[in-house]
Image (cartoon, helix red, strand yellow):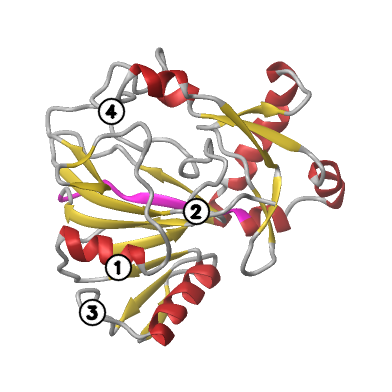
């Protein structure tokens, strides 16, 4: 297994691993460590079936079935993230950390590039550990004991971003289940022990015991700070890339700059634990 860093901030390419083959525990452990070390890893030129995609993801933990999105037919663990040439909106087109509206947000996601446009369709990844490290000591001290309220309502509830799109909440019961949960603003990574910012503009509503109007200026500062160029890696997809990101320590943003072209990605997501 050969690991090559992609940029100074985050990201690595891993070669010499066949994702269709069985792997020993040492290889799986090395992949997990690379994920922690680099935040984003990509295995180029892989050719995997949905079953192999699921099997690879399951090596890292139980797989999530998205509570609001339709899955690939016959494979509930796989999201079929598809944009047709005539469509104008894309899925994931804003900075976010996946599913932070859950009490136990995911460990990470594994995305397989099935079809990519000739130009565009890149994904941006932001290093939330580096973003935290760059804060002033005063800001770190203020944020240390703060708690944020997260919810899926802004995206998946009636009137949300996907309310009238092809990605609605599946049924009325799920609409009613769009409750809030609480997570620390400064999270400790469960493997590395590093501190990181754990807020994102898609699912973070406000700080606990504060109004939205009071929370907004601080949250907006954190969003702008954490996604400045010095903390961001931009991945240009190639067909048959299989990429995995650490959802605990990153945000990402799928760019929507390929109008008139088709893009198809399959995603499995590994369950995580409760932030602390």
Between residue 271 and residue 82, name the one nearer to us. Answer: 271
Spatial CA distance of label 3 from label 2 is 23 Å
The residue tagged 1 is: 56
State which tag comes first along the sequence, 3 or 2: 3
The residue tagged 3 is: 18
Name above or below for residue 247 compared with residue 203: below
Q: Tell us which disc is closer to us: 3 or 1.
A: 1
Does residue 30 appear in this view?
A: yes
Looking at the figure, which quarter contains the N terminus?
Answer: bottom left
Q: Quadrant of residue 46?
A: bottom left
Residue that appears at 48% across and 75% down: 34
Q: Tell us which disc is closer to us: 2 or 1.
A: 1
Left or right placement of residue 258 versus residue 4 in this view: left
Spatial CA distance of label 4 from label 3 is 33 Å
The residues colored magenta run 118-128
The residue tagged 2 is: 247
Residue that appears at 27% across and 21% down: 165
């Amino acid at each position: 297994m050969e690991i090559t860093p992609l940029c100074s901030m985050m990201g690595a390419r891993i070669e010499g691993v066949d994702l269709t083959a069985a792997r020993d525990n040492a290889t799986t452990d090395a992949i997990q460590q690379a994920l922690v070390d680099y935040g984003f890893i990509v295995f180029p030129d892989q050719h995997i079936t949905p079953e192999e995609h699921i099997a690879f993801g399951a090596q890292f933990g139980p797989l999530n079935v998205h509570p609001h999105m339709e899955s690939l037919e016959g494979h509930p663990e796989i999201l079929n993230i598809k944009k047709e040439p005539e469509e104008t909106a894309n899925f994931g087109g804003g900075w976010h950390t996946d599913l932070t509206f859950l009490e136990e947000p995911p460990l990470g996601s594994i995305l397989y590039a099935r079809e990519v446009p000739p130009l565009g369709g890149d994904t941006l990844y932001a290093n939330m550990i580096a973003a935290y490290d760059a804060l002033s000591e005063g800001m770190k001290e203020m944020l240390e004991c703060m708690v944020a309220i997260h919810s899926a309502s802004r995206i998946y509830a009636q009137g949300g971003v996907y309310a009238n799109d092809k990605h609605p909440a599946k049924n009325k019961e799920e609409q009613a289940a769009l409750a809030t949960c609480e997570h620390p603003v400064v999270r400790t990574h469960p493997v590395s022990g590093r501190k990181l910012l754990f807020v994102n503009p898609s699912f973070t509503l406000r700080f606990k015991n504060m109004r939205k109007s009071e929370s907004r200026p601080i949250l907006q500062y954190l969003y702008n700070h954490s996604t400045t160029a010095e903390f961001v890696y931009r991945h240009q997809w190639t067909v048959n890339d299989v990429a995995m990101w650490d959802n605990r320590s990153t945000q990402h943003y799928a760019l929507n700059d390929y109008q008139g072209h088709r893009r198809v990605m399959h995603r499995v997501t590994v369950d995580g634990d409760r932030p602390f």
